[in-house]
Amino acid sequence: MMGLLNILYNALASIECLILLVLISHYIFLEPSYRNKNSWIKLGVFHVVIFTILVFASEPANDLPNLTGFPTFALYSFTCRSKKRILGFFRVIPILGTMLSLLFIVEAFSYALTSNSLSESRSLSFILDAVLWIVLVIFFLKGKNWRRQFEEEIVYMPDKNWEKYVLNGAGVFLLMLSLLLVSLEESSIKEFYVRLIILSGGISMILLLIAMAAMVKQWRKKNYYMYTAEANQRFLKMELEHFRNYQQMESETRRMRHDMKNHILCMETLADKDDYAGLKKYIDSLGQNMQALDKGIQTGDPMADAICSEKSHIAAKSGISINVQGKLSADIPMEPTDLCAIFANALDNAIYYLSSSNSALEKKISINISSQGSMELITFENPVANGSLIPAAGETTKKEKSSHGFGTVNMIEAVRRYNGTLTRNVVPVGSGSVFRLEIIIFG
């Protein structure tokens, strides 16, 4: 019976260890995390297998199985990265140091105040485990909005920055300090001084952990607000360009109206002279001038109009046309920043592909908008080469990797704010293929 209870306790301890490592990895060291349930299930199976092996390989009273979280986390750090996976193994060291410092802080105060370590008091360990599980449950149940905001902000974090080196250095320092202070319990120094040193070390760890958390928060906010400021600058530029184009079209329209009487008089003169060839030529010329007064792309929203008009002007330089069918519903309002994230990034990706493609593709981009009730469907389509693969969200085929790859992620985050979905597919159309980006949002 005691052996079974010990196995159960070790199982919970190993899960606690793994959860702490994963949370510290993602929310302190800003490491990537799994995005689908299947990956988590596979990791769980691996954890169970390793735990079972350690249970059968050790004595019933041995606590070796509760170390299962460490190899499981090493696998997690390796597999959750799409690139630089070896670096994931090295990141385990500072992350492990941070987790051990959290455990040591509790151990330090227990030893400094009572001269007893937690390992000597199983009842106190049970109480601390219960408190930890309560905190974790509250975090997962009540922290949904905070986690969503966190995910939105870390999208704009650069891969390389001095803050990450500071975090890694602090984690390694915490690991070394934890091991050093633990070894003091077996030293020949007087107990009073040992307790004082350990207590001081625990307090120092608390201060360092607070500094790390504050730095991550400040760093996260700084990059997020920098991106937001740049996005707002782009919005203003697009709106200004759209307004200038509108002013020019209004001026041309007034000029055409002013000259209309003269145009009619000229056409009557040509008709009276039976100069039908000249009349046809004059009408064709007038028709070309009328086409130039086209008010541009109309989506039903000024911000979307500004974005599409600007992108249409850019696309035209590469011989690419943009066609819009349908109007955005006024009953499903969207923030200008979200509209920009969706339309600007979708069109940028399509324009980049068509302008850089060497194949003989029809250079056109289609935008179809339809709504029903509180649901709106926005579809972007452009021809692609047969057999084309879709890069994962966050990845890019562009040369400057560090400054690209955010477009799809930004669109996904914008769509999520409206409880919507975003799907990307390459579908066969006739003898060719079309990339289709479908966005569903709800008002």
Image: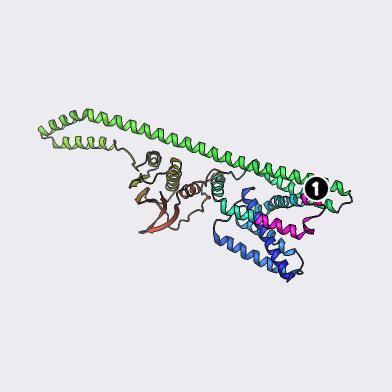
Dot 1 corresponds to which residue? 198
The residues colored magenta run: 109-133
Q: Is residue 134 magenta?
A: no
Judging depth in this view, the residue of 175 and 19 nearest the camera is 19
Give x and y (percent) for residue 414.
Answer: 47, 47
Q: Residues within 10 Å of mark 1 (few under 14, many from 20)?
A: many
- Whether 71 is drawn above or below 150: the answer is below
Residue 106 horizontal side relative to residue 312, left or right: right
Q: Is residue 127 magenta?
A: yes
Question: In which quadrant will I find the N terminus?
Answer: bottom right
Residue 386 horizontal side relative to residue 139, left or right: left
Q: Residue at x 57, y 50 (%)?
A: 143
Q: Would you identify the image quadrant in which residue 278 lies?
A: top left
Kind of residue sitting beneath label 1: Ile
Give x and y (percent) for residue 71.
Answer: 68, 60
Q: Residue at x 79, y 44 (%)?
A: 200
Q: Residue at x 18, y 38 (%)?
A: 280
Q: Residue at x 15, y 29 (%)?
A: 265
Give x and y (percent) for residue 400.
Answer: 54, 44
Judging depth in this view, the residue of 407 and 187 nearest the camera is 187
Residue 39 at least partly seen = yes
Residue 82 at least partly seen = no
Residue 322 horizontal side relative to residue 101, left or right: left
Give x and y (percent) for residue 9.
Answer: 70, 64
